[in-house]
Image: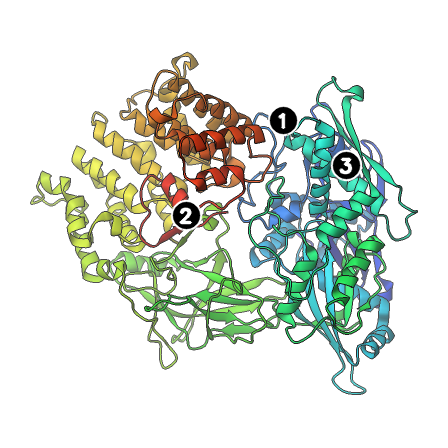
Amino acid sequence: MSAPAKNPSLIVGIDLGTTHTVVAWAERDAGPGAIRVFSIPQLVTATEVEARPLLPSLLYAPLPGEAPADPFGDAPFAIGEHARRRGGEVPGRLIASAKSWLCHPAIDRTAPVLPWGAAEDAASLPRVSPLDASARLLAHVRRTWDDAFPDRPLAAQEVVLTVPASFDQVARELTVEAARRAGLSARLLEEPQAAFYDFMRLAGAEGLDALLARSGGDATVLVCDVGGGTTDLSLIRVARPAEGQPVEVSRVAVGHHLLLGGDNMDLALAHLSEPRLVGGAGEKLDPARFGQLVLACRAAKERLLGGGDAPAPPEDAPVTVLSHGARLVGGALTTRLGREEVEAIVLDGFFPAAPRDARPQRGRSGLVAFGLPYERDVAITRHVAWFFARHAPEARGPTALLLNGGVFRARRVAERLAQVIERWGGPRLDVLPHADPDLAVARGAVAYGLALAGRGVRIEGGAARGYYVGLEPPAGGGPRPAVCVVPRGAKEGSVHAAAGRTFALVVGRPVRFDLFASDDARADRAGDLVPIEEDRFEALPPVAVAFDAGDAARAAAGKRAEVRVQIEGELTAIGTLDLACVEVGVPAPRRFRLAFQLREDGRGARAAEAEGGARAAEAEGDAAEPAQGGAAAERAPARPHAAATQGGRRLEEAREAIERVFGKGRPDVAPREVKNLVRELERVLGERATWTTDAARALFDTLAASARSRRRSADHERVFWSLAGYCLRPGFGDAGDPARVAAIAPLFAERLAFPQEARSWQQFWIAWRRIAGGLDEPLQVAIRDLADPFLAPAEQRLKKPKGVKPEALDDLLELCASLERVPAGRRSELGAWILERTWTDRDARLWAAIGRIGARVPAYASVHHVVSPAAAERWLDHLLREKWQELPSAAPAAVQLARRTGDRARDVSDRIRGEVERRLAKAGAPEAWMKAVREVVAVEEAERAAFFGEGLPVGLRLVGE
């Protein structure tokens, strides 16, 4: 979509909220008092349009035959108030909380995963990604704005888009991309800052002077913004340097990302209401109807908590969920929520008393729905106390409190938080007025734009976090060090270089850096080395850089090409982080931008040395190493590890052995030398299990360069696939793996040159199973298309491809069971075929395959690929009838199928899980297995590694969701 040329006459602020989207605007030359709210036209019924200040951030997919008007081009969805109403009436067709999904690392945020928990066979249901859902909301705003202001299109104006202060750089970049897809170029602003800009707009200079007077001349303001999906905390300092000088305002700190807000309160009320609706013990609503219940509880909560100018709230309110069947009176399930019990849950559960030294509980939550990993500790007051203690350790409490978010419309909720803070024993708390928490952020975004133009006080502060690149841990043990590349507080547009830290990067393959962020108050500078401490640093998705074709060509020609660089970082004007490697010591330095790896496998693995070392600073033979780049350059400390014996001359000897067998024709290569190639490599490098990731990938690169030579003989072909799969397993984890997988992927269609060799088919299937984690969905589907006619029951009558007669079908079955990116419906179909075989075949591998297919937590794929709980329950029903003492795979498969995730869209019923737990106990299974079925626990690294059927390369560590 081409955007009009920028010649902005207006400043437009957009609050893309979890619950509502709000737009405000003002003329560029106006004062802060001239800000207006744009009433957004939207469907309020299937045929009626009305302009309202709040646009519900919801997308509803109409039922087949349902034909609402589409005056704004939103099809195949309806957006806004009509979406909210119909979403509460029709289960499973509403997309909500897209903003929360945008920051969820366990899913592919660019894949069509929403509505979450939709039935596998819902073919008529359109699905979108969290990124596209956000873009559609912004596109609706753009179209309606352009209709209202045809002479001043939105894309030509200065747009400020707000995000939670706690959004990491990936979520910020995705937000910018959503705006771009909607045809907008936007600058980002943190929401708590926007709320304070709105306060300053209303208070004016006199209000700020009064705040300083009440605070003794220096005010520390705690901004607490509790929205629909997140709790956002910021500290802002207001001070006057000297008498007669203007007031200075700066953002001192921001809190961690907390997926905790109004949605959690609605969920808590839904869990309270559910037993009243369904009656029987252990009965639960299906995910779609539970989604209806959450919406109904939200409406009841808003009525019962009241607030603002609303009339006195009632004593109770109805909560209704429409029934799928007609057996219930009136076709609906209904209960009531009382005002006192709602206040008790919100006040005592989310705003309990918390001393200043309180700390929140960490870990995964038991209160999970729709796949979102909410905070374990829902007590907002404990998070507030911990945030303040970390960032203002010398102060007993803030001098002022600014509240924002719809929950604070309820007077008792606002009073409760203020009381908790006052009990810390700090100065008298000044609770600042807030005119309208629903509109404050959008209006504050406009006030920020005006401040940039010199029409108001600007909040200073720079980068909310410092950013660091991880290095190797010290040889003698201890915390892993990291080098600061962008310090906390860095100003917009200021470029920072990690002075004194020069890297020599070997080109010809991409290089990956482990990136960390910290909001700690310590004053690190770019180039400083600091220890990585778990409670102070947050691991971000890795960043990668690839070098140009010229360097790659020199490397391919056998010339070891290196580029010596420093890492530079900049907080851009639009609010995102720009990292790059910049050449040093050359007249015309090149700049290679570091891009975040956002694919789902980017979160799934971290390539590190056995002791946890960095990809950016490793020993000889690796992609990167610290270089002696002048007086400031530094080499990381050496340490003995497996890579030390597998690099250099030994690795070159191993590569020469591969080239001797697979390189240009050598008449002196005997057939036995081909057969014994793997044994020769083990003689040179040590046992295969000790090969490091880097050594294995180097061997693969040498082998892949001569891939056509695999057709020389049956032994060449078998050894090629045996070695290729082993060296590239599990298909991801190293920065160069996507390119490696792309290079080998076309070979699947060529299949075997010697198809009569059963052992070659076996190694062919095993190789693709080993690298399955790196295969994209189209290739995994292509594998299934080839395999299904040979695996399906005869009555399916699937047509077998001509000229293909594969052997080793058991290995083919294991491969297909490992293809987690195949659509869930086809994976369920495969599970059903295998289940049918278990009736007459006692092979333990069959249940192992079913366990993999039906696992509640995938080993490498996005969680939206998990098969339905209904399918898993059918398989468990059969497994529970088996004689487990005769099937060593029965108990592990049962754990995979019944594991509790906390996600209603994935979990099997409590009844089934109870039966599985009792059966595990009877079988003498480890307590950890029973605990995984009973409660939400993290998947251990060893469990994920076991999925691939063998040890991972040394230095590759799988990381869970």
N-term-proximal mark, 3 vs 2: 3
Pointer 3 residue: 296
Q: Label 2 crowding class (10 Å Cα cut-off): few <14, some 14-19, many 20+?
A: few
Q: Secondary structure at mark 2?
A: helix
Q: CA distance from mark 1 to mark 2?
A: 38 Å
- Give the quarter of the image for residue 581: bottom left
* Whether residue 10 can be seen here: no
The residue at the far right in this view is 311
Q: Please name the amino acid that badge 2 sits on.
A: Glu
Q: How many marks?
A: 3
Q: Which residue is mark 1?
A: 124
Between 875 and 82, the residue placed more toward the observer is 875
Q: Residues within 10 Å of mark 3 (few under 14, many from 20)?
A: many
The answer to which of 397 and 609 lies nearer the viewer is 397
| Residue 164 sits in quarter | bottom right
Can residue 931 be spotted in the picture?
Answer: yes
- Residue type at numbered disc 3: Ala
Q: Which residue is mark 2?
A: 941
